[in-house]
Image (tube, rainbow, N blue to C red):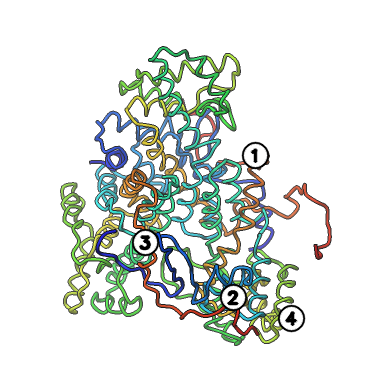
Amino acid sequence: MSEEVQHLQSRIWQEEPEADNPFACRAAYCHGYDVYGEMLGRAGWAEMVYLLFRGEAPTRTQAAVLELLAVALASAGPRDAAVHAAMCGGVGGSPAAAALIAALAVGAGSLGGAREVRLAMEGWQACGRDLAAWRRRWTEPSAEPIGIFPPAEHPAGFDPHGVSTATPVRQVLAHLAALTPDSRGAWLELHRAELEGAAGHPLSLVGVAAAALTDLGFSPVQGEMLFLLLRLPGAAAHALEQAEYGHKKFPFYRLELEDGPTEKVR
Amino acid sequence: MSPELLRENVGRIRSRMGACFLGSHAVFRGHDLHAELGDLEWTALYLLGITGRRFTDAQVRLLEALWCYTSYPDARIWNNRVAALAGTTRSSGNLGVSAALALSEAAIYGRGIDVRAIDFFIRTRAHLAGGGALGPWVRDELERCRSLAGYGRPVAQGDERIQPILALARSLGLSDGPHLALAFEVERCLAEARLRLHINYGAVAAAIGADQGLSPREYYLFTFPTFLAGMVPCYVEAAERPEGTLMPLPCAAVAYRGAPRRSWKGREVV
Amino acid sequence: MSWMERYLLAITGRRFAPRPLRLLEAIWCYTSYPDARIWNNRVSALAGTTRSTGNLGLSAALALSEADIYGLGPCVRAIEFLIRTRVELAGGGELAACLRRERSQGRTLGGYGRPLCAADERIAPTVDLARSLGLAGGPHLALAYAVEALLIAERPALRMNYGALIAALAADLGLTSHEHHLFLIPLFLAGMAPCYLEAAAHPAGAFLPLPCHGVAYRGAPRRTWGPA
């Protein structure tokens, strides 16, 4: 090993090395908890993820909420744009990682994606349970500076193509409200109609997720990251399924060229 | 927006950008790609795809140089590091480089800076054309955004890329544009305010982009491949060395700053 | 030094002369189709429609381009086969036997046949350019044609496609299969950005939306979730 070791800083993870190898982990501690010596067999997936992000073990209720959210978000179905992108990877035989990169990239945006979750959570930070504040937020012009993401086009957490609140959205909201009667989720359920009226669109699953993630204490950037993760299982499964079906069964669609020669130029 | 809009688009794509007619030809921005655009250099084609416009040879050469002069095959740089890490883990070069490119729109370097810098110059010119003063405008921007894209540098002061790109621009007769002049005026403003925020390559490149007529979105997409030529050698070199040997860390190299050891078994669960 | 020259220096450590550079650049240009139906381009368009970033859309589309049935997968298999086979033939081997061995070892020959259409409109313009540059006389290109002749005698659909052609041209310019693999990373890039842009300019979500009844379900019937 070279003399000079530049240290990596972490509050999350600490490892003890094996006696015979400074690079092999003998024990790992996540925010102080022994992962393989104690947590294994006692902690569930939702508890581990909560601990990683928040630094403390969740309560039973918090773990239940995160588990509920994980199930609700696990698959957006094959009609979802991010899942569609992953399936494009599947049908062509692109590497597994490429299919997930595609799902992440497409699922990162402000239409039903992680960007929208972050914006909605920022809304909760700014407006809380103040209906008037939400109304103002949606009617006042946005001071969003130019950045890498295109500017938001609809109130975050609402479906711009929706007509009425979709049933799964109401179902997830009802479960959240039952689990956590004093939460933002419960408030959202109570005031859904008013909020939808002010937003001009029905509430979406992103909006429900944003409320739940805020209730769990995640910051907007944590929520954005977690949403990306939680959406992956369905993308992965559908990519694998379409890989089996093959490209010939995957719709290729009709393209109407609006500019340029439809016959070869000689 | 409504389901009607979605219904109109089910199963069909309408495009002005192009199409492939397999076995026959392909259309690119209204032209037969092979028959009518076959002589175009790749960078010129890339620009046509983004903007719908043609550029002169001198412009293409200068814009392409914006990529060349910052393609550093240094595996310590965070995006390049990803390509190198893909090499050391024996992932594919394509995946490593794609991921490295994905990283390159960071807040403190790359596309995150580029898009803000060009937008700032275009807005500033409009402000000055409307009779506004530069000094207060720059101060307002700094106060609002807490930094000025294209000024200052995360790792070092001074920017070795500036002189070569300016020399090239001069040799091509493309160094007299208003945005480039403005970029240096802004630096003078910052110096007068005793702020040690020297102009960096990001500002110079963005100004050059704006002087060639690129909008912020066009410039942002144009700069996508900027670091690519520097990424691939990082992958190659790490892939040639024994696997796992790029920047390995022993347990002791992590400086832990977190909660003390505690028992999972013993915790109170509410 | 142009960017292409720099890119090739980065990959190979070698400088290339103007005519090979022209040909290699055209290899990228002639297959940069801004058609959003093609699976990798479709990802960049989907990123546009979901209002994700262009950088993410293009990165993801590039990641996808290393597929089995198109893109880098068949291209790399093609150059590996051509380089390997040329060495074997130079040592006295026989082409038909090489092809039979490929099939018997379960290796899919890259560069022949095409997923969506047998004919390949990219071949003629590329070969024309190669000829005009004096770069169409190499041994790998001759081998690629010889392979085609043998394949189409059995299956007419297995005509040489762009993948085999560019593999042969690259090999004749001295690229190894690994170098060719890296050279191909930006192969389709110029066609991707327009796909992102166009979808981003249209209303959000308007790129290839699908109603619920657009999915033909083939799975298990409805059933109740309960304890195992």
Q: Quadrant of residue B58?
A: top left
Asked if the residue under mark 2 is in contact with the one under mark 4, i.e. CB atoms within 8 Å, the reply is no
Left or right: A7 as drawn, with respect to C121: left
Find residue A66 and report its image quarter. Answer: bottom right
Q: Secondary structure at mark 1?
A: loop
Name the secondary structure under disc 4.
Answer: helix
CA gap, disc 3 and disc 2: 33 Å
The disc labelled 4 sits on which kind of residue? Ala
* Residue B85 placement (x, y as % from top left): 39, 53
For the N terminus of chain A, the quadrant is: bottom left
Relative depth, front residue between B171 and A123: A123
Horizontal side of C45 relative to B65 (left or right) equals right
Please give the residue where the numbered disc 2 appears in the rendered image.
A213
Q: Amino acid at mark 2?
A: Leu
What SS does tag 3 mark?
Answer: loop
Counting from the top left corner in percent of width and height, residue B38 is at 38, 32
Q: Residue A128 at x, y = what percent? A: 57, 85
Q: Chain of mark 2?
A: A
Counting residues from the start of the chain, the first of labels 1 and 4 encountered is 4
Q: Are marks 1 and 2 on the same chain?
A: yes
Q: Secondary structure at mark 2?
A: helix
For disc 1, the marked residue is A246
User: Dot 3: within a 10 Å radius of its alpha carbon, few (fewer than 14), some, or many (20 or more) residues?
Assistant: some
Mark nearer the N terminus (1 vs 2): 2
Q: Would residue C140 be visible to someone looking at this image?
A: yes
Q: Between marks 1 and 2, how big is the CA–CA gap?
A: 37 Å
Q: Which residue is mark 3?
A: B249
Separation of marks 1 and 3 at Cα, in angstroms: 42 Å
| Front label number (4 vs 3) | 3
